[in-house]
Amino acid sequence: MPAPIEDYALLSDCRTGALVSRDGSIDWLCLPRFDSPSLFGALLGEQEHGCWSLRPADDAATSQRHYVSDTFILVTRWETSEGVAEVHELLPLHPSRTDVVRRIVGISGRVEFVTELRLHFDYARRLPWVRQVGTASEPALLAIAGPEAVIVRGVRLVARDHRHRGAVAVSAGELRDLVLSWFPSHEHPRRPLDVDESLASTRSWWQEWAAGTRHEGPHRDEVVRSLLVLRALTNRDTGGIVAAATTSLPEQFGGSRNWDYRFVWLRDAALTLEALIAHGFLDEAHHWRRWLLRAVAGEPSEVQIMYGIAGERDLPEREMPSLPGYEGSAPVRIGNGAVDQYQGDVIGEVMVALEAARMAGLEEGDFSWPLQRALIDEVVGSLDRPDNGIWEIRGEPRWFTHSRVMMWAAVDRGVRAVREHGLTGDAERWERTRDDLRREIDERGVHADGYFVQHYGSDEVDASLLVLPQVGYCAPDDPRMLRTVTQIERTLISDGFVLRYRTETGIDGLAGGEHPFLACSFWLVEQYAATGRTADARELMARLTALANDLGLLSEEYDVAGRRQVGNTPQALSHLSLIRAADALGGHRGRAADRC
C-alpha cells in the first residue's frame, strides 16, 4: 500500500525525480528521465512493484524530516530507544551519470537500519538478472534487465523471493553510504561515486541557484520553494519543463481520471517560464526558448500542445495493467492521448510568455521571432475551429471562452511586438483579427446576466475565466469579471476551494468527479488581490499554503473532507500559481499590468 500523496518528498537531479515516503521508502523512480519506465513503481501498486526501503530496525522509531536549506537534499532524523541517526538522500547533479545516494549518519548511541530492495524494471513488467559483483569489504549488487542496469553499493544484500535485504548499524560519528547507480546495460558499471564531493557540489548548485531569486512581498519561503520545484521539473540538458514528476495519481481515489503528466505542455511550460522570468531567472527563459524552437520546428499547422522532454512528438496513450494503480485507481496510463487534441489557448500562452521574456531583456534571435510570426498566423488560420480547451476535455469540442481569449492574446502580442518593439509583421491584419475576436467574445462569451461563460451558448462558468484579467483582456474590476467571480463563488466553490468546472454537466465526457483544483484557487487569490478584496485574498492564500506538505510540496488537487492531496505531484501548475498569487498579494500584477 503506497503512502498518502502528501507523505512523499521529491529528490531531483533536474533530469528525473524520486519520491521518498516518510517511512523511508523510495516508491517511485524512473531512470534516467522523468518519462522513462519506472524502476520503482510501488506508488502505483504495492511493494512488489518496486521500491527501496531504508529505516531503523526498531519499529517504534520516530522521524522528522526537512530539506537542507534551498535544496532537494532530504534529511530524515530517526530516533530510537538506542540512539539517533540521520539519512541524507539526494540525486546528485552530475553531467554524465545518474545515482541515488542514501547516506546514514550516526548522531548518538547506536542505530541499526534495515534495507529492502525490490527491483522491478519497465513499469514492473520485468524482473532483472541479479548477481553479487563486490567483495566482502565492498559489497555490490548488479541487476540487468534488457537495455538497463543498476549497481547498488554500500551494503551486502541477500536475495529472498525477488527481494534483497540487508542491515547496517551506525554509532555516533559514523557514516555509511548506500548508492544506486544506473547505466545502459551494454556499458561497464559506473565507478563508485565520491559521495562527499557529490553532496557538496549538489548543495552548492541548488543554493546558488536559489540565491538568484528576486521576490518582494509575502510568503517568501513558499515562493522560493515553489521556484525550486519548477527548476527541479526542468531538464537541465534540454530545457523541457514537465508538468509533474508522476503519472496516474488519481483526481478521484478509485476512479479512472488518471493521467500521465511527465511531459512538456506548452501551456504549463510557458506559465512556468513567466514565473521564473518574474523572479530573475532569464537564463532559464533562454534555455526553454531554444527547446521550443527545436520542438515545434517544421510546419506550424503541426504544432502540438505537448511534447516529450527533448521535444519528442510521439506520445501515444496506453494502459499499463502491470501496475494496479494508486489505491486501486485504474487504469494506470503511460503517454497522454491529449497530445492529439486541438487546444486553442496554447499558442496564446506561449506568445504571452515570450513577450514577458522580451520585456525582461531577452533579445530575439534569427529564428525566434519568425517562429512567433508563424504561430500567430497559425492562430489566425484556426479561428473557425472549436477546441478541447485548457482542461483537455474528452467530450465534444466547444467554443471555449478562455480559449478564444488566449487566441486574442496571441494576436495582441504580435501587434505589440511590431508596434512597441519594432519587429516585422503584418500588424494591420493582426489588429483587425484581434478586434474582430474581441467583438465576437464580448457578444458570444458573455451571458445575458453579464458574466463570462465557460463556452459559447452555456450558462456555466469555468475557473479558467479567472485568467482573463491576467492576460489583459479586461480589467480585474470590469463589471463582467466581477459578476463572473460571483458566479464562480456560487457554483464552483467546494469546501472553500475552487473546482475547475462542474463535472456533473458531462461536458468532459468522463465518468466520476474530482476535487478542488489548487491552481484555480490561487487564481482566485490573485483576482481578489487585484480588486481590493485583500482580506479575502490573504485568508484564502493562508488556507492554500497550509495544504502543502511538511516540505512545501503541492499536488494537483486537494480532498478537503479526507484532508489529503490528490493528483500528480509535485505539480508545476500549482506551484507557479502560488508564486503568482504571492506576487499579487505584494501588489504586483505581472504580465497584465499595462495590457488592460
Image: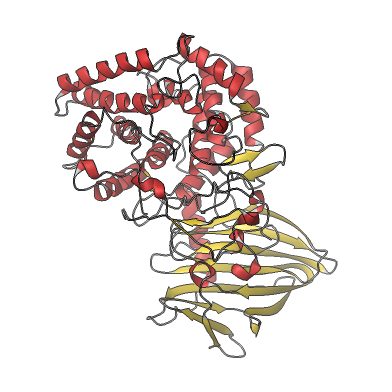
| Residue 70 can be seen in this image | yes
Viewer-nearest residue: 175 or 396: 396
Residue 190 in percent (x, y) is at 44, 78
Looking at the rendering, which quadrant does residue 135 occupy? bottom right
Q: Spot the residue most to the right.
A: 81
- The number of callouts visible is 0
| Residue 91 can be seen in this image | no
Residue found 55% across the figure and 14% down from its top = 532
Q: Is residue 386 left or right of residue 27?
A: left
Residue found 52% across the figure and 28% down from its top = 523
Image: 442 above or below 251: above
Residue 213 in percent (x, y) is at 47, 39
Image: 190 above or below 471: below
Viewer-nearest residue: 221 or 455: 455
Question: In the rendered view of the protein, which quadrant contains the C terminus?
Answer: top left
Q: Is residue 251 left or right of residue 393?
A: right
Image: 81 above or below 376: below
Viewer-nearest residue: 112 or 34: 34
Q: Spot the residue most to the bottom.
A: 136
Indicate the colouring scheme: secondary structure
Question: In the rendered view of the protein, which quadrant contains the N terminus?
Answer: bottom right
Viewer-nearest residue: 76 or 230: 230
Looking at the rendering, which quadrant does residue 474 occupy? top left
Residue 192 in percent (x, y) is at 49, 78
